[in-house]
Image (cartoon, rainbow, N blue to C red):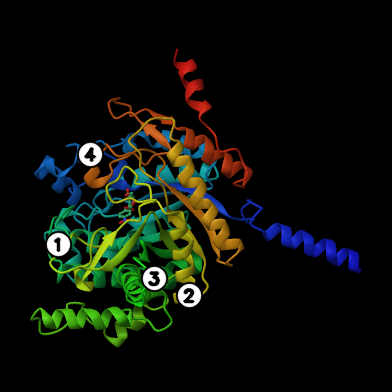
């Protein structure tokens, strides 16, 4: 190459990677996600048995904000063809959904495999593949068979083997066609989120003990299921497996040393406790958290730390059990030291009593429709960089990101949220050198949003829950997202407000 060629070549290279260029790297893929209890409905149909969410919503309907439940939800058990059609309309390269444990294994154990459950997922997987859409399958997304809860659920060490048995069934039934797996979704939510608050299924309050047992066994269950795939299925199917972690980013309340340290401790306590044993070079619990929790436990009168120790064998079992990092990101928090006599709410959405810390939001962070949701896009990039700094370079797939609204088709807030967060990914990739290879929007359609019921909407598609067919209608954000996918770039017009008017004309 002559000097002119070198100049042109470097200019092209520099241009391709500058932030002005809003295109996604070649090979970057887009998807959308759902989860079984949130969309399927058919709670007692097709051979499915009761799970912990069925029990929770039926026992006392007032537990859910709008008194709804997931009995029918989006009726995806019957409307799966329409779900595939929507994925196709959006131009998704992959669709992430989860398997209902009690639909596949009604006893919770592999003694009986429910044919109807198996057929349902086979239809969905085959239907997606026919359209050229890759299925990304979450084996467990919060809906534990009630039979296993009755035996202690995630606080019983035996769940490690129960889960591995279930994962084996999933790999065996679907592994020939499913190449990207998530063992478990967001253990921080069903461990810390449940046991610290005494809210949500299975409604057990045990912040000082239960949350940490659940933490330990969820990670061991993931690790064993990863090793099972690695040894017995990967050689023939060549897929990849990870665990999806909810990463809440923590910002220090101010720039004092005390708060900078506290924010780092909070990251280790929320994110590190679910990632360090798997992704760090050393393995095991984050050392800073191990230390704090031992001190706190002894002070509370326990004989040893409530954070259960790992044996060396367990540390080795978990270390390195990933093929990529599955990351869910929604929101950020400010964290500060508690003042004398302050009351604590429940971690990880609220305060952290173990760290004597109080959670706040910055005044300029907009609030979404969910009570826990503050919008801070820069937190996303900071979180991504923190992961690289902690665990080194690895492939990262964003397996959930999205915002809640109160409803309506003209969802400009959602468009803005997607735009701002995808921009942070581009910055992380192009400026910071992170290896983010895919993005999955939460969620394909409005669905049962746990304690918030059907009232809080996260969907690219609106679902009419009063219609027996659960009619799905694309929102403005669905158009926007499909345009991003087809242009493989964020460099597209953002104003989709005209969409609503067009719709009105069609209706008239
Ligand atoms: C996730 N937080 O839950 C779940 O994976 C989905 O099932 C859920 O519908 C979606 O996000 C929206 O809520 C979250 O503390 C739970 O930041 C907690 C948090 C975020 C998401």
Please, what secondary structure does the residue beneath circle 4 have?
loop
Q: Quadrant of residue 171?
A: bottom left
Q: Which residue is mark 3?
A: 255
Q: Which residue is mark 1?
A: 343
Q: Which residue is mark 2?
A: 389
Residue 502 location (% of width, % of height): 51, 21
Extreme top residue here?
508
Q: CA distance from mark 4 to mark 2?
A: 47 Å
Residue 71 location (% of width, % of height): 22, 38
- Crowding near pointer 2: few (<14 within 10 Å), some, many (20+)? few
1 and 4 marks in contact (CB < 8 Å): no
Residue 437 location (% of width, % of height): 55, 59
- Crowding near pointer 3: few (<14 within 10 Å), some, many (20+)? few
Q: CA distance from mark 3 to mark 2?
A: 20 Å
Give whichever of 481, 418 is nearer the camera: 418
In front: label 1 or label 4: 1
Q: Which residue is mark 4?
A: 45
């Amino acid at each position: 190459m002559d000097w002119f060629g070198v100049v042109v070549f470097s200019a092209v290279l520099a241009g391709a990677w500058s932030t002005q260029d809003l295109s996604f790297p070649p090979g970057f893929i887009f998807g959308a996600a759902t989860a079984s209890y949130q969309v399927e409905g058919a709670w007692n149909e097709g051979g499915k048995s009761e799970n912990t969410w069925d029990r929770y919503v039926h026992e006392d309907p007032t537990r859910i904000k709008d008194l709804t439940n997931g009995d029918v939800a989006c009726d995806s058990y019957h409307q799966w063809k329409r779900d595939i059609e929507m994925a196709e309309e959006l131009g998704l390269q992959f669709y992430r959904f989860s398997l209902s444990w009690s639909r596949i294994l009604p006893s919770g154990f592999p003694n009986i495999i429910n044919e109807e459950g198996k057929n349902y997922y086979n239809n969905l997987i085959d239907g997606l593949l026919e359209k050229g859409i890759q299925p990304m399958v979450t084996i467990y997304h919060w809906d534990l068979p009630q039979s296993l809860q009755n035996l202690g659920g995630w606080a019983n060490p035996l769940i490690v083997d129960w889960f591995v048995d279930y994962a084996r069934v999933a790999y065996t039934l679907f592994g020939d066609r499913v190449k990207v797996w998530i063992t478990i979704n967001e253990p921080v939510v069903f461990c810390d989120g449940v046991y610290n608050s005494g809210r949500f299924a299975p409604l057990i309050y045990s912040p000082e003990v239960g949350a940490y047992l659940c933490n330990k066994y969820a990670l061991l269950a993931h690790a064993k299921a990863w090793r099972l795939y690695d040894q017995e299925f990967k050689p023939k199917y060549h897929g990849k497996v990870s665990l999806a972690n909810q990463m809440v980013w923590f910002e220090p309340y101010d720039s004092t040393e005390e708060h900078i340290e506290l924010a780092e401790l909070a990251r280790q306590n929320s994110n590190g406790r679910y990632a360090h044993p798997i992704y760090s070079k050393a393995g095991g619990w984050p050392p800073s958290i191990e230390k704090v929790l031992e001190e706190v436990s002894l002070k509370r009168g326990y004989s040893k730390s409530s954070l259960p120790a790992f044996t060396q064998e367990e540390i080795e079992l978990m270390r390195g059990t990933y093929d990529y990092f599955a990351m869910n990101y929604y929101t950020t928090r400010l964290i500060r030291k508690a003042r004398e006599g302050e009351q604590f709410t429940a971690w990880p959405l609220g305060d952290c009593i173990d760290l004597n810390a109080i959670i706040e939001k910055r005044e300029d962070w907009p609030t979404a429709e969910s009570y826990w949701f503050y919008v801070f896009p820069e937190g996303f990039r900071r979180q991504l960089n923190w992961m690289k700094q902690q665990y080194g370079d690895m492939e990262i797939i964003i397996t959930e990101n999205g915002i809640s609204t109160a409803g309506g088709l003209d969802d400009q807030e959602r468009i803005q949220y997607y735009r701002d967060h995808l921009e942070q990914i581009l910055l992380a990739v192009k400026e910071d050198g992170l290896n983010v290879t895919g993005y999955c929007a939460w969620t394909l359609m409005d669905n049962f949003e746990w304690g918030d019921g059907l009232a809080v909407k996260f969907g690219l598609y609106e679902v009419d829950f009063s219609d027996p067919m659960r009619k799905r209608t694309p929102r403005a954000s669905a158009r926007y997202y499909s345009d991003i996918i087809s242009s493989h770039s964020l460099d597209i017009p953002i104003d989709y407000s005209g969409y609503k008017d067009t719709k009105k004309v069609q209706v008239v």
